[in-house]
Every structure is written in structure tokens, then in C-alpha cells.
Image (tube, rainbow, N blue to C red):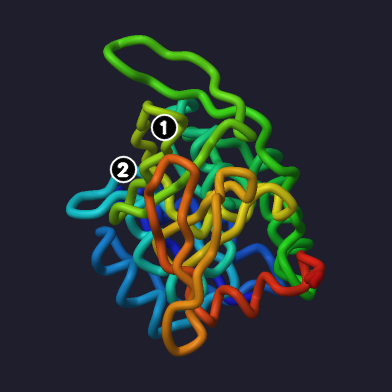
């Protein structure tokens, strides 16, 4: 298993190297101290697994995952000193997270879980999200996912539209899409997902694309590529 280490603290990198060097099936293919270095070096070395610090200069761990997503990110174990990052780590599809300072037993548990994921032919499908925790004006509340009308990508964030309200969440579009029920939502293009029941009509557009009109009057283009990918989810009647 090819493993990469990204952490801005030299002692933390040394500890990971020490633990990993005891594993006969592990090859350490590189390490770095910044997020930007991590993106470039991970792309070059193509590891199976990355131990990725969250708090790094220039680009944090979540930003690294967002940058890597287009080319297909490797399995990620986030390494952090703050346990409040755990939920978000799983939201972006991490295998697990290591809370500093971690014990040999905790490291072994995480590594074994990562081994199983790397050995799988594909990623295990997470359960669909049912609720989102959103914050607005200093208050937090839960929103039912089935009430979401539209999701739009915005760099390392997504904008979630629920009726007349809009919430901004820090996660990637790809990671969020994986947690949605495909029976309820359609990804129209790289930047837009809509709830099926929020669609009013679809109009033929150009080059195999469709223009989707939502019930609130908003529009978006359903690209031929994403329409073909979703075809197996829907029956077509005349």
C-alpha cells in the first residue's frame, strides 16, 4: 500500500513514519509540510492512502481534498488536534481521522480500516444524508435534506437552497453528491444538483443538453454527460 504523509509539524511526520515503517505492506512514497505541496506531490506519486493534516499553511486539508477531487482523490485519513473536525472529515469521504496525540492502538485500528478500503474494488457507499446542520445569524438548526431544492458549487463550498433560504457549507460538490439519495436528487452538471420534485419541466436545448426549469422559476442546464449517467435511475414513458 503506497502511503503519503502531509503535516506541517516535523515531529508528527516522524511519528507517522515510525509507525508506518513497522508495516511490511506499506511503502511511504513521499511527505510534505504544506497544502500546496501536498496537492502537487500526491498527483505525482499516486498514493493509495494519505495521512493528511487539517491545519496546514496556505491550503488546509479540506482544501487539498477539494483540489484533488477532479482527478480522483486517494483514500484519506485526516490527522488533527481538534475533535470538532471529525464530522466534517467524514462528510468529505475520509476513511477515518486520527486525533493528536494518537496511540499505537488507535493508529493500528485506523490503518487496518484504511487497508480494507484500499483493498475494495470501489468505495463503500455511505448512507444517504437525512438532515443538515446549518448556521445562520449566529444560530444553528437542522434542515431536512428532502426539503432542499437546489445545490450549487462555489469553489470549496456549496450553496444549499431551501425555499427562499440559502445556506453556505464548506464541503466539495462531489463529496456531498455521494451522500444524497439518487432517487430524490439529480446532478445536472458539474456545478448543480436539484431535487427531482422541485423540477417543473425540462426543455430540449442543444447538443443533447436539456434546460431544466424549477418550480420557483430558476433554470439550469442538464448536460448530456450527466443525463447519460443518471439514465439508469429513471424510467421513461410516453
Q: Is 96 situated above or below 144? A: below
Relative placement, left or right, of 117 versus 136 is right
| Residue 40, picture quadrant | bottom left
Residue 199 x/y as whole percent: 56, 50
**Circle 1 residues within 10 Å: few <14, some 14–19, many ≥20:** some
Residue occupying the far left of the picture: 58
**Circle 2 residues within 10 Å: few <14, some 14–19, many ≥20:** some
Q: Which residue is mark 1?
A: 81
| Residue 22, picture quadrant | bottom right
Q: Are marks 2 and 1 in contact (CB under 8 Å)?
A: yes
Residue occupying the far bottom of the picture: 207
Q: Quadrant where the C terminus lies?
A: bottom right
Residue 77 in view in this figure = no
Q: Nearer the viewer, mark 2 or mark 1?
A: 2
Q: Quadrant where the N terminus lies?
A: bottom right
Q: Is 152 situated above or below 165? A: below
Q: Which residue is mark 2?
A: 55
Dot 2: element: loop
Residue 221 x/y as whole percent: 42, 68
Residue 96 x/y as whole percent: 62, 46
Does label 2 or label 1 sit earlier along the sequence? 2
Q: Which mark is residue 217?
A: none
Amino acid at each position: 500500500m503506497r502511503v503519503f504523509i502531509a503535516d506541517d509539524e516535523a515531529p508528527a511526520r516522524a511519528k507517522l513514519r515510525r509507525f508506518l515503517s513497522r508495516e511490511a505492506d506499506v511503502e511511504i512514497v513521499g511527505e510534505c509540510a504544506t497544502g500546496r505541496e501536498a496537492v502537487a506531490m500526491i498527483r505525482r506519486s499516486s498514493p493509495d492512502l494519505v495521512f493528511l493534516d487539517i491545519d496546514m499553511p496556505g491550503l488546509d486539508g479540506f482544501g487539498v481534498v477539494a483540489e484533488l477531487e477532479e482527478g480522483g482523490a486517494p483514500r484519506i485519513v485526516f490527522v488533527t488536534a481538534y475533535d470538532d473536525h471529525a464530522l466534517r472529515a467524514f462528510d468529505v469521504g475520509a476513511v477515518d481521522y486520527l486525533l493528536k496525540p494518537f496511540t499505537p492502538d488507535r493508529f493500528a485500528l485506523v490503518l487496518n480500516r484504511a487497508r480494507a478500503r484500499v483493498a475494495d474494488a470501489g468505495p463503500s457507499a455511505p448512507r444517504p444524508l437525512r438532515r443538515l446542520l446549518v448556521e445562520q445569524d449566529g444560530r444553528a438548526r437542522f434542515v431536512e435534506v428532502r426539503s432542499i431544492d437546489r445545490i450549487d458549487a462555489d469553489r470549496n463550498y456549496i450553496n444549499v437552497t431551501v425555499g427562499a433560504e440559502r445556506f453556505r457549507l464548506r464541503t466539495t460538490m462531489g463529496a456531498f453528491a455521494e451522500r444524497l439519495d439518487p432517487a430524490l436528487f439529480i446532478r445536472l452538471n458539474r456545478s448543480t444538483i436539484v431535487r427531482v420534485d422541485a423540477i417543473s419541466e425540462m426543455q430540449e436545448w442543444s447538443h443533447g443538453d436539456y434546460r431544466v426549469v424549477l418550480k420557483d422559476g430558476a433554470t439550469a442546464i442538464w448536460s448530456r454527460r450527466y443525463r447519460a449517467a443518471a439514465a439508469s435511475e429513471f424510467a421513461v414513458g410516453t
